[in-house]
Amino acid sequence: MQLYDLFPKDEAPFCTRQIEEFRTDFRGLAVSHNVPLTLSTLLKLSPFIENGVSLFVTTPDNLGYESVALSYLQEQGILFDLDKQKICHGDLFLDCSANLLGLGKPSMVAELTQTGVKKYQEASPTIPVVSIDDSYVKRLEDYFGTGDGFLRAYQEKISHSIRGKRFLIWGYGKVGKGIARSLLAEGAECLVVDLLAKNIEFAEEKGAIGILPSDEAALRQAVAHTDCLITASGVRSVISNHFLAEVIRDSGLILVNMGAEDEFGPKFSQDRVLNRKIAFNFILREPTRMKYLDPVFYAHNRSAQLFLQGKLKEGVAVFPKEIDLEIVKEWETLWKIDTKELFAL
Ligand SMILES: NC(=O)c1ccc[n+]([C@@H]2O[C@H](COP(=O)([O-])OP(=O)(O)OC[C@H]3O[C@@H](n4cnc5c(N)ncnc54)[C@H](O)[C@@H]3O)[C@@H](O)[C@H]2O)c1
């Protein structure tokens, strides 16, 4: 199987460029890689593979992997270590959800997720740990990519018609704002629920209706007159723990989770929430389009190179701002998408 038969190189200009950028830096050090193993992830791995860097590859706990992607790794003679027994032999850890925390003796870590970064912070590391989650680059995925992914999933699996429909979005952070943006652009009405007054104000500025989770009258009204409820708060069981949980469950609302956790919680059966409570865009073959993942993958990989160039210090730190902004600017030019909204999230 040829990787670039599956993905034309121009879909991932950053990862493609990184193949050249990684020509000299790795000097025999090995990379341990824990990111969901999909076909897209192979492009992320290509700068290492094409430069002969030693790789130990795994996939986050409880998430499956795409067998086509695994076959490709096997063809390249790369070790895939589902049980994480051998993954600890790497020197540079590229992690997701802190699944590699406590394994081996890495010289550096780059972590993709907010929950993972918190775990590394609690461990007070004495090596550099780079947080990709706090970067503007990650917002390209969270805001633009997830909005696009939700819309594609909704149109493919529920209905092509969006204009005039009403959506209630629970959690109006980066993901919730991105979904609302995509829906509003298609002529939908959006009501959003968030704990923060500043997000309620932001919603009103964007043409959505903001509701606090404590506003019972507005929420009852919204539940009765909305087509679909989307959770994106990042909080497990946020709906089960709300005083209107039963009203929501017994309503005619289409229920969809977009968070990484089960945000509906124990009061909702798997059948009541589409895609059995798993983030709804993961119902698609390509949950997030490569163009939104490419710069995030690039930044995650680039962290390892920054370490080798002596540019990282001990402890948890955000991905360097200057490089972060450079990548966003370049992405904006490449894809002709205005990114200034990202800075106001
Ligand atoms: N499906 C995907 O492809 C995808 C992609 C990226 C992130 N995610 C997941 O989406 C979730 C949200 O991520 P994010 O980056 O938007 O997080 P975020 O922290 O930017 O936003 C969460 C928002 O929810 C609000 N909130 C928290 N508790 C609430 C409550 N009880 N009621 C109402 N609002 C509440 C917060 O005030 C905040 O505005 C996370 O689980 C993340 O892992 C999914």
Image (spheres, rainbow, N blue to C red):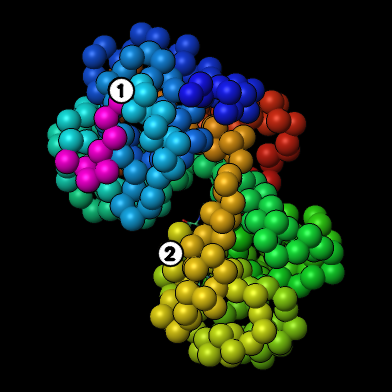
Q: In this rendering, which labeled residue sits more in front, label 2 or label 1?
A: 1
Q: Nearer the viewer, residue 207 or 176?
A: 176
Name the side, left or right, on which 111 lies relative to 1.
left
Residue marked by disc 1:
77
Label 2 crowding class (10 Å Cα cut-off): few <14, some 14-19, many 20+? some
Mark 1: amino acid: Gly
Q: What kind of element bears circle 2?
A: loop
In the image, is the residue at mark 2 within 8 Å of ligand 1 by its beta carbon? yes
Position of 289 relative to 20 (above/below): below
Q: Amino acid at mark 2?
A: Glu
First in residue order: circle 2 vs circle 1: 1
> Does the magenta run of residues contain 81?
yes
Identify the mark at residue 261; answer none if there is no mark.
Answer: 2
- Residue at the (58%, 28%) spot, across then down: 7
Q: Secondary structure at mark 1?
A: loop
Q: Tell me where residue 321 appears, x and y as whole percent.
A: 48, 33
The percent coordinates of residue 305 (x first, y second) are 36, 21
Boundaries of the magenta span: 78-85
Up the image or down, 167 lies above or below 26; here it is: below
